Image (cartoon, rainbow, N blue to C red):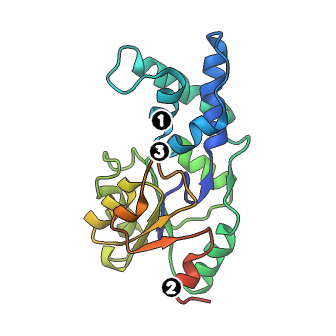
Amino acid sequence: MLYDLDGTLIDSVADLAAAANAMRAGRGLEPLPFAAYRPHGGSGARGMLGQAFGVSPGAAGYDALKREFLDVYEGLMFDSTRVFEGMVAELDGLADSGLAWGIVTNKAERFALPLARALGLQAGAIIGGDTTGHTKPHPAPLLEAARRLGVSPQSCLYVGDDERDIVAGRAAGMATAVATWGYLGPQADHRRWGADLALAAPGHLLKSLGLP
């Protein structure tokens, strides 16, 4: 089993939003409501900066804002981030069933590795956005996770909350599942993504697979 991180295993958007609002405060701007940020949680810095400042990659000054955002986020990324309720029991159930599991995220290792350690996520493999030189929807990160776990891609199921997760999983030859409790993206319709499963809540995967 392979999982996306933000919006699938962990709820991290409060800390991402706090970093963006801290940057707004430093410029004399009022904070934006949490609800404005949540649908963009899966897009990391790009999503947060787009909401906070209306900028996107390629815009003048974007790279400097992104560096600032990442530095601010690193200082508070443990404040409110938590594992979604039900996921710890699911991961324990996978281990009890003898199934290996890993994490494949577009979050850089600089953030993904310490977060996983702090939250007690003992994955067999953790692949960040800078591990392979590719980010999802490219299949390379998922294929690297399968390699590290010693399993074939065809024997993997990838769970994520963004369309790019499903695209990457299918490109890697894996079965896919949508974490419908996640951030999903603004106006997203996950039913159009072509995933094999749609999971209604954290912890539902074992039941969907007929595991105890």
Label 1 – label 2 distance at C-alpha: 33 Å
**Number of other residues with Cα within 10 Å of mark 2, as a class: few under 14, some 14 to 19, many 20 or more:** few
Label 3 – label 2 distance at C-alpha: 29 Å
Amino acid type of disc 2? Answer: Leu
Q: Do the residues labelled 1 and 2 touch (CB within 8 Å)?
A: no
Element type at marker 3?
A: loop
Q: Nearer the viewer, mark 1 or mark 3?
A: 3
- The residue that disc 2 covers is 209
Residue at the spot 29% in from the left edge and 57% down from the top edge: 140
**Number of other residues with Cα within 10 Å of mark 1, as a class: few under 14, some 14 to 19, many 20 or more:** many
- The residue that disc 1 covers is 47
Q: Relative to 23, is 192 above or below?
A: below
Amino acid type of disc 1? Answer: Gly
Residue at the spot 68% in from the left edge and 60% down from the top edge: 120
Element type at marker 2?
A: loop
Give the number of the disc on residue 186. 3
Amino acid type of disc 3? Answer: Pro
Query: What percent of the width, then of the height, locates residue 67?
Result: 48, 24
